[in-house]
Amino acid sequence: MENLTLAEKGKKRVDFDRKEMPVLSQIKEEWAEEKPLEGKKVSCCLHITTETAVLMETLIAGGAEVRLCPSNPLSTQDDVVAYLNDIGITTYGKRGDSEEEFYQNIIKCLEIKPQVMIDDGCDMTTYYLNEIEEDFPGFIGVCEETTTGIIRLRAMENDGALPFAAVDVNGSQIKHLFDNYYGTGQSTITGLMAATNRMIAGTDFVVVGYGFCGEGVARDAAGLNARVHVVDAEPVKSLRACMDGFNALDMDEAAEIGDIFVTATGNKHVIDGEHLAKMKDGAILANSGHFNVEINLDWLSDNAVTSETVNENVMKYELEDGRELYVLAEGRLVNLCAGQGHPASVMDMSFAGQALSARWLFDNQGELTNKVYQVPTEIDNEVASIKLSSKGMKYQQLTEAQIDYLNSWEEGT
């Protein structure tokens, strides 16, 4: 009875969010007739949310055999897992899985020997490469969702260690310009507020990392009247933050003035022990990067005289000098682990890009080399066109003369 009730709750939430996902819904309708993935096997390692459920329904409608497991132990929504299994989509995992359970879920997903993987953070991909002794028959490649995963894939490519094709879905325009910017900005703030109920206005709010995710967080924090400070390792991005109206500084200085810190770099220990040692009493630390390595949690554990959970998703560390620092969601993705993640409207575009990129891999099998591919422009344009139409809006199409002009070089002054 409990599982049935949980599945029904998941169904209601998925139905509610599906209304905000017209692009993926249209693809699902088309694929239900065309069956472009008939007989194909796809294994997915993604945050298990209501929006992910709509992607799974779309792949199934296209004819694929699908298995799904979580890409983060604390982002799994148990009612969505129950709903997906209830409708026959094989889904593993629960919120709070141990590390061992996390990888067991990946193993179960790979048992079908997929031809394509859809990954978020590259954990399924690297497990396949490092732990599976056989090459899956007809394996084509992977579609990667997030910045951290792409960093890993490009490192493999640069080392000559990437033995198949990969699609940089994170780098597509319909993903990083919307999901990373608008989605991460809003969901990080709402996750932070859900965990702490702290006022954002009037705080010194430090954003570490000024890629598209960090930009979104900084913009939304400023919109709530915080004083925003930005730390980035690249001079150009730091200058952009300055020109956007924020205070660009290094981590040493930021550590001493920040009330709230949010990391979004995809890198390790960007808030390190030397920075934690300088922070104000009561400083709040959160992470919006994929892995829980951006804040040096080991230093906190080693140097705290006591630590305790003071609220759901809030851990207090008391240091020897009496200062107390608060870490949200165990240093994992605060927007998904302390909140519900990105709004369905923006995930509609990201997951439409995932679905179409997976189809692109299948359609181009045999023609691809072992490298990281950008999402084809026509996929970006298709998703954007459907999204605009769903909002009752249009874009200006070029005339043949204008297209000829842009493709020529003879005509000048």
Image: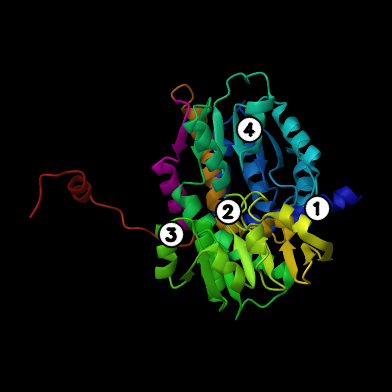
Q: CA distance from mark 2 to mark 1?
A: 22 Å
What residue appears at the point 77 percent right and 62 percent down from the top-left corner? 313
Tell me which label, 3 or 1, sits earlier in the chain.
1
Look at mark 4 in the image and give the residue it sits on. 126
Look at mark 3 in the image and give the residue it sits on. 237
The location of residue 196, given as percent across then percent down, is 73, 71
Which amino acid lies under the numbered mark 4 shown in the image of this protein? Thr
Q: In the picture, which quadrant includes the C terminus?
A: bottom left
Which amino acid lies under the numbered mark 1 shown in the image of this protein? Glu
Mark 2, residues whose alpha carbon is within 10 Å: few (<14), some, or many (≥20)?
A: many
Q: CA distance from mark 4 to mark 2?
A: 25 Å
Measured along the vertical axis of the image, is residue 153 above or below residue 230?
A: above
Provide the residue span drawn in magenta: 368-388
Q: CA distance from mark 4 to mark 3?
A: 30 Å
Residue sitting farthest toward the front: 321
Tell me which label, 4 or 1, sits earlier in the chain.
1
Look at mark 1 in the image and give the residue it sits on. 8
User: Regarding mark 4 in the picture, which secondary structure is present there?
Assistant: helix
